[in-house]
Image: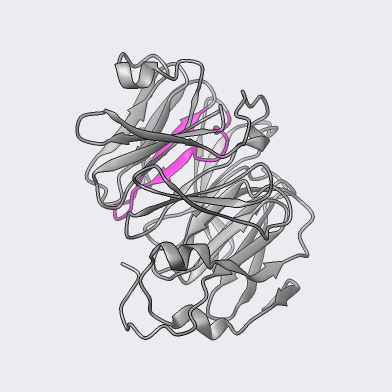
Amino acid sequence: METGSTQLVSNMDELYIKTRLNDSKIRSFTVKMAFKDRFSLTNGMDWDSAGETMVTSSQDKSVFIYSLNKACITNILQSKKHGVSGVRFTNESPRIIVCSSSYDATAASVKLWDTVENRYMRSFSLGAPLISGRGISPHPNKDMMLITTANDTCSLYNYDNSTPLFSYKGRKIIGAFDTLGLIFALYTSSVEKKEISLYDLSRYQSIDFNPNGRSLVIGTNFARLICINAMNGTTLFACCYDNRPSYIVDDKDLCFPSISPDGRYLLSGCTDGRLSIWNFKGQNVCCLPGHEGPPHFACFNPKKAIISSACVKVAWWLPDLKGTSDNISTQ
């Protein structure tokens, strides 16, 4: 059943024109579709591995499923009893998602949710609520996930067992799998590395591996994104999504980045409502206006030249493909 009102501003057939991202294409991204019937702040967003289905979660205890092919919301799920504070697709996407209970829930938990049958498959009890934004890191091809909670604990779970395989405690910890699922990273604010100690005033809020495997990007609560070499840990560059970086007290004001599937561009929403895009030399390629309100979540589609952004409203962005004649994929 199709639900949700949308505003269509151009032909969505452009989604399936094959192209290669470059600086010119990046600068030409504009909002092509906006979902404006939302009234609650988005607290989670993810694309499935095929790039055809998107999921978001909201503070009003709702989960929205979007179809790129149908260009609409195809399902709305409710979690009235437990609430929801974050959502990701599992390796069984787009059918199975993993979501966390809301921060004010009586008992903190993470649940595997079958979106077709609308039922919980398994519940994982947690000792504290999930951290904001990137507390769930599903393995890209195995039935496993890393869960980071507000009591400074990162735990590795198998989907078949509600008891963690291991738990690691560390001050202000965050964990994530790499895009191939070969390794995972755990970072704490007390790691004794000179290149990280330069940012002692910041707290790590997210980790994103570059698909090329050569670097990773760490998000902090100082409106700063730090790119480091994945092999030796040296800092490659740092950039900010606020014109005047300052300590962010409320997690709702954080912006969470995304890396293009070709590993060439870093994307983040900005506090002034724009999207900022950098290359991996640390150079700002462009700042794109068009989102209503600060987009706390911004994501590259893993298979297509499309960007999604969300605060209360959700938007899809496409580049100007006029004159495109190269029949090649984005990767």
Q: In which quarter of the image is residue 108?
A: top right
Q: Is residue 93 visible?
A: no
Picture coordinates of residue 258 (x, y %)?
46, 50
Picture coordinates of residue 159 (x, y %)?
38, 47
Magenta stretch: includes residue 148 = yes
Residue 314 horizontal side relative to residue 211, left or right:
right
Magenta stretch: includes residue 50 = no
Q: Quadrant of residue 132?
A: top right
> Magenta stretch?
129-149
Residue 9 horizontal side relative to residue 132, left or right:
right
At a point 20% along the width and 29% down the height, the residue shown is 232
Residue 113 horizontal side relative to residue 101, left or right:
left
Question: Where, quadrant-wise, is the N terminus in this rendering?
Answer: bottom right
Of the pair 80 and 241, the residue shown nearer to us: 241
Picture coordinates of residue 243 (x, y %)?
62, 36
Question: Where, quadrant-wise, is the C terminus in this rendering?
Answer: bottom left
